[in-house]
Amino acid sequence: MSEPRRPRGRPGPADPTDRRAALLQAARSQFAAKGFAGASLRSIAAEAGVDASLVSHYFGDKQQLLVASLELPVDPLAKLRGVLAGDLEDMGERLVLTFLSSWDPHRAAFATLVRSALDRGDPASAPVLQVAREVVTTSLEERIEGPDAGLRAALIASGVIGLGVMRYVALLEPLASASAPQVALLHGPALQALMDR
Amino acid sequence: MSEPRRPRGRPGPADPTDRRAALLQAARSQFAAKGFAGASLRSIAAEAGVDASLVSHYFGDKQQLLVASLELPVDPLAKLRGVLAGDLEDMGERLVLTFLSSWDPHRAAFATLVRSALDRGDPASAPVLQVAREVVTTSLEERIEGPDAGLRAALIASGVIGLGVMRYVALLEPLASASAPQVALLHGPALQALMDR
């Protein structure tokens, strides 16, 4: 990561808190309008009136900026990177357990995110689904091996997010009331089957 | 199945088409108000002004009446019973392939069902989620063996419905564009892991 430079010859917020807030607002606006691939860190920094090097200083990489811009109660990227750093052989169960123990205390927030994402004409552009695609699916694809890694990664992401939809939003019993470790124990091998090829 | 009897001493539609329509309307009303367990075939027939024996004559059992009342473009109960009648050993793949080949031509209808089910304060009472619970989960639970069959059945139902949500509503790529047989080949073993215990 390069040293942050001062913004030069361009008006913009001087206070670090204001700069950070301006970057988040510009990120939300550009990710929603242009999508993850279309929005660049440079264009986001320009809209915020902040030097582009400050983006990595404040947030890290583009995935982290996307996640930060949603101000979620759980950081899915940090959680996922923790899971992916471990052994592949029991990753299915750890992925489910980490997902459920992270979101079980935030069921209502998860339900609101799902409703707002699905209730629009162009759901694929919803920021939280950009996270599902550009952060969760992409990170999984980099970690698992074998053929069709992209589609298998999407199926794993779908398996975890679908679990959240049925547990937190549809309230499908007995899934909605089962303990997180019990669900992880049973559902882990299903996701594991998608990882091992 | 007993012979249908004429309604006696009670006003109600005389024409078979009207009787059937009256039963469907009463079923929709009572399943939505009382849930699947709370609504009886007797009370539905009474609201329709039709003899209770005609319900089984027109629709079969209570599960079939629930599914008929939703007027879906795909009959999930008939499709599921076809899958469940086959061998258990490759049921995961057949379940996914049957689901996708049934709903791929009706993506917009699936998306509308999901949105209308999730976009309410009490989603568990949504008729289409009653189908997920009382028809899909229950039928799977009766078919698979071993411990925790109820929770495993709910996870299989969640795995199939979640797949539909991500493919048809969230449009998660490359899942949204992959061919049905390819998805079934990859996702089948994941569901199979939930069937075999």
Image: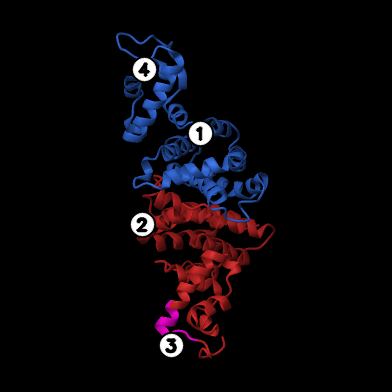
Chain colours: A blue, B red
The lab-note entry on whether marks 1 and 2 share a chain reads: no
Q: What's the magenta region?
A: B11-21
For image coordinates 40% across by 22% down, the residue present is A23
Q: Pointer 3 and pointer 1: residues touching (CB < 8 Å)?
A: no
Determine the image quadrant of residue A73.
top right
Give the x, y percent position of residue B34. 57, 66
For image coordinates 52% across by 53% down, the residue present is B159
For discs 3 and 2, the disc positioned in front in the rendered view: 3
Q: Secondary structure at mark 2?
A: helix
For discs 1 and 2, the disc positioned in front in the rendered view: 1
B99 or B154, which lies in front?
B154
B93 or B113, which lies in front?
B113
Q: CA distance from mark 1 to mark 2?
A: 29 Å
Give the x, y percent position of residue A190. 57, 50
Q: CA distance from mark 3 to mark 1?
A: 58 Å
Per the rendering, the mark at residue B120 is none
In this picture, residue B148 sits left or right of residue B95: right
Mark 2: amino acid: Ala
Mark 1: amino acid: Leu
| Label 3 crowd (10 A; few <14 / some 14-19 / many >=20) | few
Q: Pointer 1 and pointer 2: residues touching (CB < 8 Å)?
A: no
Per the rendering, the mark at residue B108 is 2
Per the rendering, the mark at residue A72 is 1
Q: Pointer 4 and pointer 1: residues touching (CB < 8 Å)?
A: no
Q: CA distance from mark 4 to mark 3?
A: 76 Å
Q: Pointer 3 and pointer 2: residues touching (CB < 8 Å)?
A: no
Q: Chain of mark 1?
A: A
Q: Which residue is mark 3?
A: B14
Q: Secondary structure at mark 4?
A: loop
Mark 3: amino acid: Ala
B195 or B151, which lies in front?
B151
